[in-house]
Each structure stands twice: as structure tokens, then as C-alpha cells.
Image (cartoon, rainbow, N blue to C red):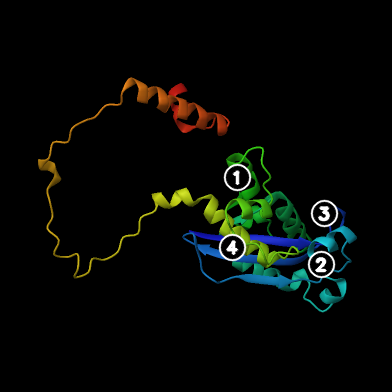
Amino acid sequence: MRQVVLDTETTGLSPENGDRILEIGCVELVNRKLTGHNLHFYINPERDSHEEALKVHGISNEFLKDKPKFAQISDELVAYLKDAQVIIHNAPFDIGFLNKEFERLSMPSMAQLVSGVIDTLSMAKEIYPGKRNSLDALCDRLEVDNSDRTLHGALLDAELLADVYINMTRGQDALLMEVEQSDSSTSNVKKIDLASFELPVIYATEDELLKHEDVMVQIDKSSQGKSVWRQLQTA
């Protein structure tokens, strides 16, 4: 599976009111592993940043004057994102800005371009309800080193988010198996026919069943009633 972790920096908060993208950072994952095939643009937004936005990203209008406009990088960006699953922290924000930029160029929207979007902010709110779930907070919680992050930067934030996402979904690794060809050290191992064994069935005690049910109730509560086993019970 090919995934792209994406982040943007913008001149302000509202694409509908004319704010524009001034930086895009993308990090590629293939089968949950970093490939190093990243994409990064500084973009001339054709307008000044709001003062509050400038405090966040620190990218001056002077620095951006000689950078390409979005129309000049759009084809390369589209080719890179095509059919990927995109991972974004607070996805509606970045998707809204990208869609507005594509709309100006009469290009397809993100929904038409990518295979799907994962919002890590929504995911974090479900996993850690009631806690701070900013990128910095998640880095601290998941022990991802963000010591170089003094200001927001699209590529650095995408790199950090890739680590956060992998750590946040690490339990999925148990479901992945890599099949390797046998070598000389394993080819001569004697095979055992397990069909000849009669394995005993050990049933849970009443106390163990009660404790198991208590754990299931807690998991069901933390997932806001989305537990698959509960849905099957009521089906």
C-alpha cells in the first residue's frame, strides 16, 4: 500500500476568503515503511501572510517572491498524490486549501485524485479521548523526537506525522506477515505432522469470564460503542 503523509503551510485560515498555500511537504510510505521519496515545495502565494500565520510558520513574503506559483507545481503534485492514501493531521483544513487551489486551475478535487484520506487528529481523539492531540502533544506521548520543531514547517511536520502515525497504529504490525524464501539453515528442518496430536481444550473459569466481560465493557465504552463484537451480538 502506498501512503503519502501531507502537510501545508498557508497565509491564513480561510481559503474561501483568499488565503493561499505557501508550502507543501509530502512523505511517502510504502507498506508502512519510509521510502525517502518525498516531495517539498515553497510556493509564491501571490499575497502576504497574515501576521498570526507568519508567527506560526516564520516564512517571510520576501523569501517567497521568487518561488513558483501553485499552477507551476500542480502537475508534479498531482502525479505524486495520484491514487495514494493520504494521511493528514486535521485533514479538512489542508484538503480545503488544496481543493481551492485545484478549483482555480479547473483540476480534479482531492476526492477524485487520491484513494482515501486518514485524519490523524480524528484518530487521536478516538484513541486518546479528552487529551491534547496536537502534533506536538502526540510526539511527546508517543516519544517521537520533535526537538527541531521551533516553527511549523510542512516537510518537517509531515516527517513527524509519519512517525506519529506509525507509532499510533503499531498494533497493526501484528497482522502483517512477511514471507521469505527458506535458506540452507532452514531447509533441512524436520517437519512434524501436527494432525497426530490431540490438544486439550481448556475452558475459562467463571471468574475469568467475568473479568473478560469487564475488559470488553471498558473497550466498548472507550470506542463509543463501535466494538465489532457488540455489533455482532445485537445483529
Residue at the disc numbered 1: 123
Q: On the picture, is 106 further left or further right than 49?
A: left
Which residue, as the protein is rendered here, is positioned at the far top? 206
At label 1, counting other C-alpha atoms closer than 10 Å, the crowd grade (few under 14, some 14-19, many 20 or more) is: some
Task: Give the SS element for disc 2.
Answer: loop
Q: Quadrant of residue 180?
A: bottom left
Label drawn at residue 13: 3
Label 3 vs label 2: CA separation?
15 Å
- Which quarter shows the C terminus? top left
- Badge 2: how crowded within 10 Å, few (<14), some, or many (20+)? some
Residue 116, given in percent of the width and then of the height, sits at 58, 52
Sequence-wise, which precedes: disc 3 or disc 2? 3
Mark with earlier residue (2, 4): 2
Residue on which the image places disc 2: 58
Residue at mark 2 to residue at mark 4: CA–CA distance: 30 Å
- The answer to whether any part of residue 41 appears in the image is yes
State which mark lies toward you, 3 or 1: 1
Residue ID at (74%, 67%): 23
Label 3: few (<14), some or many (≥20) within 10 Å?
some
Amino acid type indicated by mark 1? Met
Residues marked 2 and 4 touching at CB (< 8 Å): no
Q: Earlier in the sequence, mark 2 or mark 1?
A: 2
The percent position of residue 62, horizontal first and vertical second, equals 87, 75
> SS for tag 3?
loop
Per the model, the C-alpha gap separating discs 2 and 1 is 29 Å
Q: CA distance from mark 3 to mark 1?
A: 22 Å
Q: Residue furthest bottom?
A: 66
Return the mark for residue 82. Answer: 4
The answer to whether 117 appears left or right of 106 in the picture is: left
Residue 139, quarter of picture: bottom right
Q: Is residue 115 left or right of residue 146?
A: left
Residues at circles 1 and 4 in contact by the CB criterion of under 8 Å: no
